[in-house]
Amino acid sequence: MNEKENVKSVFAKNSNAYVTSSTHSKGSDLPLLVKWLQPEPSMIALDIATGGGHVAKHLSKHVAKVIASDLTKEMLDNTANHLSSYENIMYKIADAEELPFENNTFDIVACRIAAHHFPSPEKFISEVYRVLKPNGKFIFIDNIAPEDSRFDEFVNTLEKMRDYSHVRSHSILEWKELFTKYQLTVMKEQVRKKTLPYQEWIDRTLDSDEAKNKVGSYIVEASSKVHDYFQVDINQGEIQSFTIDEWMVMCEK
């Protein structure tokens, strides 16, 4: 099974979990992206890898139309049903690396907590550039790898253990190199520590106790420096939560 089939498999099985997930449905970044973008009522927006539709939902109140796209049909069907009262959201099965849209179509393109599943970040960014109108805005939010290779290896190994559709969380430097190559100018950015409630996080993708125990052991047995960096909270031998780095950035074409 290739990487994109892995994504379809995981997200088809867990489609509703991404609608209800506190990590995805809440967060200060959702109202902030509207504040940064300052969308206008005439605009058309594209939400790439919409998942539970949280970005599409927030943008729909401020623009003429939002296209919510996703690779996984079951995910998109579930989200369309969940957001059925939002009449200006349209749904399209689409690969982030081969978008089925004309050049210079969208005033806004967004992608939130999804790009770590994409096999080719460069194809994704080239497609974002292609479908954006001149002076259009691209809002990007994702988990990122720390610059320190020890922490990079830890978080990417952990995510792959928990979710086999995970490809890689890239560093800010890696993303910025692609933005520069495809003439996307960074306008605003921020990095934050995002707290993940452990039980909800692990239950979202894993079913077997054996698999969950392997993930738990990997975290518990990590070095004290890893525990400090990722703010691992262990109470009476039980992992309560930990943090990962998340980057939010707005670019202009």
Image: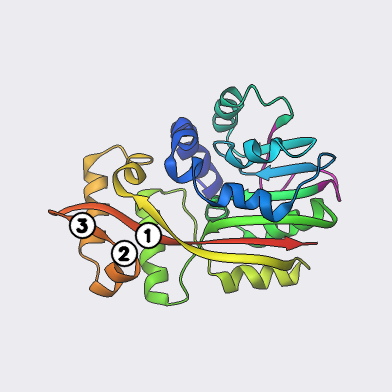
The answer to whether residue 26 is visible is yes
| Element assignment for label 1 | strand
Provide the residue designation for mark 2: 231
Provide the residue designation for mark 3: 234
The answer to whether residue 218 is visible is no
Residue 147 as seen in the image, left or right of residue 46: left
Which of pointers 2 and 1 lies earlier in the amino acid sequence?
Answer: 2
Of residues 18 and 126, which is closer to you in this image?
18
Most common SS among magenta residues = loop
- The spot of residue 5 in percent (x, y) is 53, 42
Provide the residue designation for mark 1: 243
Q: Residues within 10 Å of mark 2 (few under 14, many from 20)?
A: some
Rendered view: 229 above or below 32: below
Rendered view: 228 above or below 54: below
Q: Do residues under tags 2 and 1 come within 8 Å of each other at their CB atoms?
A: yes
Q: What distance separates the C-alpha of mark 3 from that of mark 2?
A: 10 Å
Q: Could you tell me which residue is drawn at 80 percent across and 50 percent down?
A: 131
Q: Could you tell me which residue is drawn at 51 percent across and 43 percent down?
A: 7
| Element assignment for label 2 | loop
Quadrant in which residue 206 is drawn: top left
Which of pointers 3 and 1 lies earlier in the amino acid sequence?
Answer: 3
Quadrant in which residue 77 is drawn: top right
- The spot of residue 56 in percent (x, y) is 65, 38
In the image, is residue 3 part of the stretch drawn in magenta? no
Residue 186 as seen in the image, left or right of residue 64: left
Of residues 138 and 180, which is closer to you in this image?
138
Quadrant in which residue 195 is drawn: bottom left
Residue range corresponding to the magenta coloring:
91-106
Q: What distance separates the C-alpha of mark 2 from that of mark 1?
A: 6 Å
